[in-house]
Image (tube, rainbow, N blue to C red):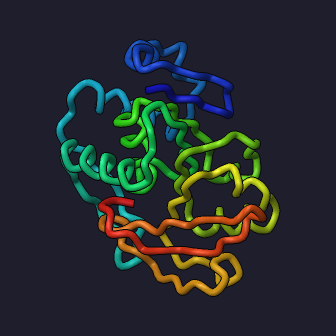
């Protein structure tokens, strides 16, 4: 597994995670969320058994949930298998990692032994034309891309959306509703012009 902090042009290999965390001179360059990502990836590698996250509250009151590493791994394997994502894939994490949707991108990259690119949620319009095998976003980010950087949607092989209702103009004729982030994900597919032409609720655990 590799983590690429795009803001810093910093790429860390899995063997570097622990040493980077313990070197105070190194990790002062990371934001609190970036440190959280690095710590979770390190914990996954070093055998931590339970992890706690926040739900988005899209289908009810936000709450804290605790899941076992085995549950997270099985969820990631299910998603990767469903989309036929091969090892050493490239993932984009551009939502808050403390929420289950963001944390699952870390787990998928860990299971896949691929590269996880980190982009702060508010910097979604700073995307370049890097090709990604799997991206997770919230509808607000998708709406911004759809409006201002529509061509970038062609760079995502698979896009998972959760946390709120999709804007009608973004989802076209498809009906959409909030999904419980702990039980389902929504998968959007795009045509060559970047228009969402099909969406489907998938019975896969953990958006």
48 lies left or right of 123: left
Q: Is residue 188 visible?
A: yes
Q: Position of residue 37 (x, y in %)?
A: 45, 37
Task: Judge by depth and name the residue closer to the eye, 202 or 92.
Answer: 202
Q: Position of residue 77 (x, y in %)?
A: 31, 46
Q: Position of residue 27 (x, y in %)?
A: 52, 21
> Within the image, what quadrant is residue 133 found in?
top right
170 lies left or right of 109: right
Task: Judge by depth and name the residue closer to the eye, 47 or 113.
Answer: 113
144 lies left or right of 66: right
> Within the image, what quadrant is residue 191 found in?
bottom right
Quadrant of the rendering where the C terminus is positioned: bottom left
Quadrant of the rendering where the N terminus is positioned: top left
> Within the image, what quadrant is residue 165 found in?
bottom right
Vertical placement of 38 versus 69: above or below?
above
Vertical placement of 78 versus 38: above or below?
below
Task: Judge by depth and name the residue closer to the eye, 174 or 56.
Answer: 174
Which residue is painted at 58% across and 49% down in the image? 94
Q: Is residue 36 visible?
A: no
**Given the current orientation, which residue lies at the most extreme right position?**
148
Which residue is painted at 29% across and 52% down in the image? 75
Q: Position of residue 4 (x, y in %)?
A: 58, 29
Vertical placement of 8 versus 176: above or below?
above
Which residue is painted at 44% across and 38% down in the image? 86
Which residue is painted at 33% across and 48% down in the image? 76
The number of numbered discs placed on residues in the rendered structure image is 0
141 lies left or right of 136: right
Task: Judge by depth and name the residue closer to the eye, 66 or 78.
Answer: 78
């Amino acid at each position: 597994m590799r983590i690429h902090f795009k803001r810093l042009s910093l790429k860390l290999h899995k063997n570097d995670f622990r040493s980077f965390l313990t070197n105070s001179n190194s990790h002062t360059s990371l934001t609190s969320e970036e440190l959280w990502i690095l710590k979770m990836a390190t914990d996954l590698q070093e055998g931590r058994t339970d992890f706690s996250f926040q739900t988005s509250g899209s289908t009810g009151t936000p709450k804290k949930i605790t899941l076992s590493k085995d549950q997270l791994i099985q969820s990631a394997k299910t998603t990767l298998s469903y989309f036929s994502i091969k090892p050493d894939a490239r993932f984009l994490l551009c939502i808050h990692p403390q929420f289950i949707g963001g944390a699952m991108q870390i787990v998928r990259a860990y299971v896949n032994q691929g590269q996880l690119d980190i982009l702060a949620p508010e910097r979604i319009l700073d995307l370049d034309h890097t090709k990604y095998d799997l991206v997770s976003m919230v509808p607000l980010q998708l709406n911004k891309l759809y409006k201002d950087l529509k061509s970038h949607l062609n760079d995502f092989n698979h896009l998972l959306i959760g946390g709120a209702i999709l804007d009608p103009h973004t989802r076209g004729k498809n009906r959409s509703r909030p999904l419980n982030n702990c039980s389902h994900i929504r998968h959007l597919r795009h045509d060559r012009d970047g228009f969402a032409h099909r969406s489907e609720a998938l019975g896969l655990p953990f958006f």
